[in-house]
Amino acid sequence: MSRKLIGIDLGGTTAKFAILTELGEIQQKWSIPTNIAEEGSLIVSDIIESIKHRLAMYDMTKEDFIGIGMGTPGTVDRENGTVIGAYNLNWKTLQPVKEQIESALGIPFAIDNDANVAALGERWQGAGENSSDVTFITLGTGVGGGIIAEGHLLHGAVGAAGEIGHITVDPEGFDCTCGKKGCLETVASATGVVKLARTLSEEYSGDSKLKFMIDDGQDVSSKDVFELAETGDEFALIVVDKVSFYLGLACGNIGNMLNPTDIVIGGGVSAAGEFLRSRVQEYFNQFTFPQVHESTKVKLAQLGNEAGVIGASSLALKFK
């Protein structure tokens, strides 16, 4: 019987787990709440206990596994298997994750940034079709990304490669939490789309349900913006066009620099689907030279929430 992989996708609210074949097929999956109390000191022990419980339940031992891979927020030292600065986990100090998990479970362990492992997942089992050149962009509460070039996940000098959310798309734009102005994250994340809508609504005077909702002080989500645009709401269409312009500009810069076969867009905002993708593609074509827009496709992610656990598990293949 061939040995298995374990993938862990650690987030601020839940930790997702999966047991997979070495070909990347999920056989079992489950999740537990992330307990960030006491400076996140319980998170790793909860992960260990959950894995122990499942292995006992399925009558499996450490010998049944090639390894464990994990994706996490924060700054990751891949060699030492440590994480620091994962503020949504309350991890302000250095966390020796690899050391804790390997000594408790006796299974080899590898770790990387959560956006990077989602990129690996989409490349391996999703829209990237196992191509050796794939860029992944995730549009959620923030904007993250991962870059696979010539078969290698890029990390850069301090692990900051793939910070696509901080590509400048409007030098005079909104302030970003990183300290810079006009980052893609400020206009294409779920919160960024709403902020853009609120700002643009000040100058729009036509008839629009979206403008009415904003002026009326109602809660507006990025989902509302895209749904109203799809019904033909004139102002919502202006907002979506602006978001698509910024995304197309960022994707164009990525395309001209890296020429991947696929730029894959995932995360909550990508639920807008083809309605968003086709508009981003149009601007992408405008901002790239012919050889690039003929060879690089803008695609929608296919794996949804499973990208993280699938990509994380692939980190463990190096232990084969």
Image (spheres, helix red, strand yellow):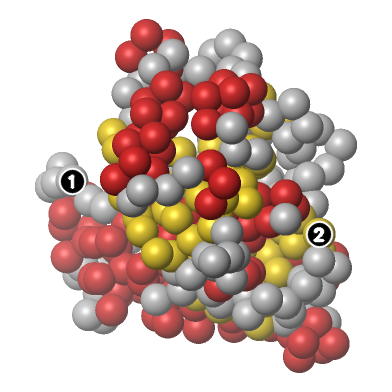
Instruction: Please give left or right for residue 146 compared with residue 304 in the image.
Output: right
Asked whether the residues under the numbered discs 2 and 1 touch, taking CB atoms below 8 Å apart as contact, a structural biologist would say no
Q: Position of residue 72 (x, y in %)?
A: 54, 37
* Secondary structure under the numbered disc 1 in the rendered image: loop
Tag on residue 152?
Answer: 2
The image quadrant of residue 57 is top left
Q: Where is mark 1, residue-wise?
A: 219
Q: Residue at x 46, y 74 (%)?
A: 302
Answer with mark 2 or mark 1, whichever residue precedes in sequence: 2
Query: In which quadrant is the C terminus drawn?
Result: bottom right
Discs 2/1, front: 2
Tag on residue 73?
Answer: none
Mark 2 surroundings within 10 Å by alpha-carbon count, few (fewer than 14), some (14 through 19), many (20 or more): few
208 vs 147, nearest the viewer: 147
User: Mark 2: which amino acid?
Assistant: His
Q: Residue at x 60, y 38 (%)?
A: 107
Query: In which quadrant is the N terminus drawn?
Result: bottom right
Q: Residue at x 33, y 14 (%)?
A: 37
* Secondary structure under the numbered disc 2 in the rendered image: strand
User: Mark 1: which amino acid?
Assistant: Asp
Residue 294, placed above or below residue 6: below
Residue 90, placed above or below residue 281: above
Instruction: Please give left or right for residue 320 compared with residue 113 in the image.
Output: right
